[in-house]
Amino acid sequence: MRLAWVCRYDTDSQIAMAPELPVCWSKLADQGHSVHMFGGFVSRQNPLLGTLLFYATLPWTAFKMRTWGAEAVFFAEALPLVALFFKLVLSVPAGKAYGDRFGLPPWLSLSLDRIELPHMSALLCRGETVASDALSRGAQASRVAIIRDCAEKVSLSSSEAKRKLEIPEEYMVFLYAGRLAHERKLDMLLQSWTYLVRAKKMHPLAHLYIVGVGPAEPELRKLVVDSDRVVFRGWVPEVLPYHAAADVVVAMRAPDLDGNGVMPGSLLRGMACGSIVIAADCSGSRELVIHGVNGFLFSSSITSISNCLLHAATAPDLKLTMGSAAACRVSKLTPKQLGYDYANLVAQMANL
């Protein structure tokens, strides 16, 4: 099978976020399949403009695929209608990853899914809730596989990571790493943080590091303009050292948001690194996090988030016990295992 692999981002960026991909590609090659990359020009620093350009160039990408002789297409992301476009234009089996709604209104994401999912020859779902959603929207059960994101950790101690990132070693590091989008409800996190700091309830050495860029950044900066306990680091090429440095990782996603079955990658990386994790009490997070055992779950209120932050900051031995339980929970989500599962799902298109 000549497989066209499509992604918005360049190969190095893909691998940095999904280390199981080289294993998948190698396994496909061992099975006699030929894989060729298409796309790969969108910058993670300005994804919105790049994504619009990506959609605009789909006809040209399809032409290149036809010239190469693609016999199947796999789109390694959840953007709507891309995989369906290639299937219709090239008349070949097509598959995609599925889960993130990208902030689309629920009625729109439902409509787009019902158009696209019944026609997918392979559907990679990052969790049980996501797979259930896909089936309810027309996906064929025999072509759906639940393959979680990789829980990768970096081979740096907390002290080494802090030195690398120029973070004072005595700091208690709280981390949010991800897109600064309005639907992530980061304003709730910053309001909770500001309240705890001003009320002198937060640990005196606790600092919140925010890693990422997005449209909500100007508004978020205004919320903490007079605080020296919140540090914006912007876009960084390597996010894993921040997870190694973090004592607490906060994975923000509104509990009542459509698509809340998606499991944030930052949550998995935080668990793998043995950090205390705080996540929204939604179906995706509950698949891995047990409140009070290997992490904390918050509801959609500032009080709930504040309580989780406070618990994480005021129990000195919590990282050792809770962090160890979190790391154990995701220990099997390795690049090798997930890469093999990924390859098996994609290879099934060769039989269609």
Image (tube, grey):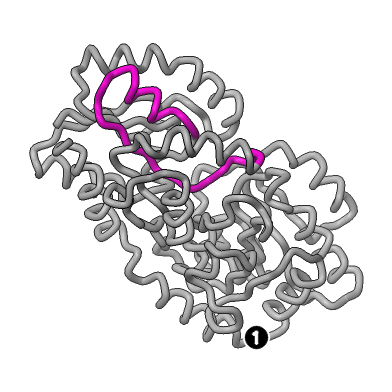
Residue 40 is situated, as x and y percent measured from the top left of the image, at 40, 27
Judge left or right: residue 18 versus residue 133.
Answer: left
SS class, disc 1: loop
Task: Please name the residue shown 53% across and 73% down the image.
Answer: 289
Query: Relative to 20, is 196 above or below?
Result: below
Q: From the viewer's side, name the closer residue of 53 and 14.
A: 53
Q: How many marks?
A: 1
- At a point 39% along the width and 64% down the height, the residue shown is 155
Q: Amino acid at mark 1?
A: Pro
Q: Nearer the viewer, residue 313 or 129?
A: 129
Q: Which residues are magenta?
A: 80-105
Which residue sits at x=58%, y=74%?
A: 276
Q: Is residue 205 above or below residue 132?
A: below
Density class for disc 1 (Cα within 10 Å; few <14, some 14-19, many ≥20) is few
Picture coordinates of residue 60, whole percent (x, y) = 38, 12
Percent x, y of residue 258: 62, 50
